Amino acid sequence: MKSQEEHRANRRFPIKKEIKYSILKRGSHAPDHGKGMTVDISTNGVSIKIRRPLEVGVKLDIEIIILEHPRVSYVGTGHVVWQHKTLTGIKFADGFRIHKEEAASASTIL
């Protein structure tokens, strides 16, 4: 019998970084925000640990903070594909990019 890791198309890496998210709601001008920690990351998605569960199918704006000073983040969108207690699986949408803050008032998207 194959392990869960053997069933995955992409290898997951145990990387612990802060993640911030905003729930994308149609017709809402005040999105719901949250934060947590990554558990592992692959090229297609990320497992995160958060305090309150998110519903499967919810679309999110995501920022994974790679470095604090200067602030470098991996930013884009995704959607929740599974939820179990405090763990949530998010599949990345196309178009993730690196965002670097160069100064207090300027930023660059790479």
Image (cartoon, rainbow, N blue to C red):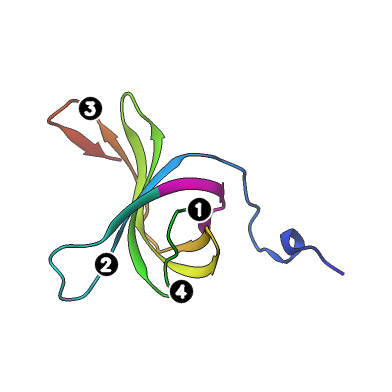
Magenta: main secondary structure equals: strand
Q: Secondary structure at mark 3?
A: loop
* Boundaries of the magenta span: 36-46
- Pointer 4 and pointer 1: residues touching (CB < 8 Å)? no
Amino acid at the residue labelled 4: Val
Measured along the vertical axis of the image, is residue 73 above or below residue 91?
A: above
Find residue 44 and report its horizontal and vertical position in percent.
52, 59
Find residue 37 and report its horizontal and vertical position in percent.
47, 45
Q: Which residue is mark 3?
A: 102
Which residue is found at the position 16% from the left and 27% from the top? 104
User: Along the horizontal axis of the image, is 86 left or right of 62?
Assistant: right
User: Along the horizontal axis of the image, is 10 left or right of 31?
Assistant: right
Name the image quarter holding the C terminus: top left
Q: Secondary structure at mark 2?
A: loop
Q: Nearer the viewer, mark 2 or mark 3?
A: 2
Q: Which mark is residue 24?
A: 2
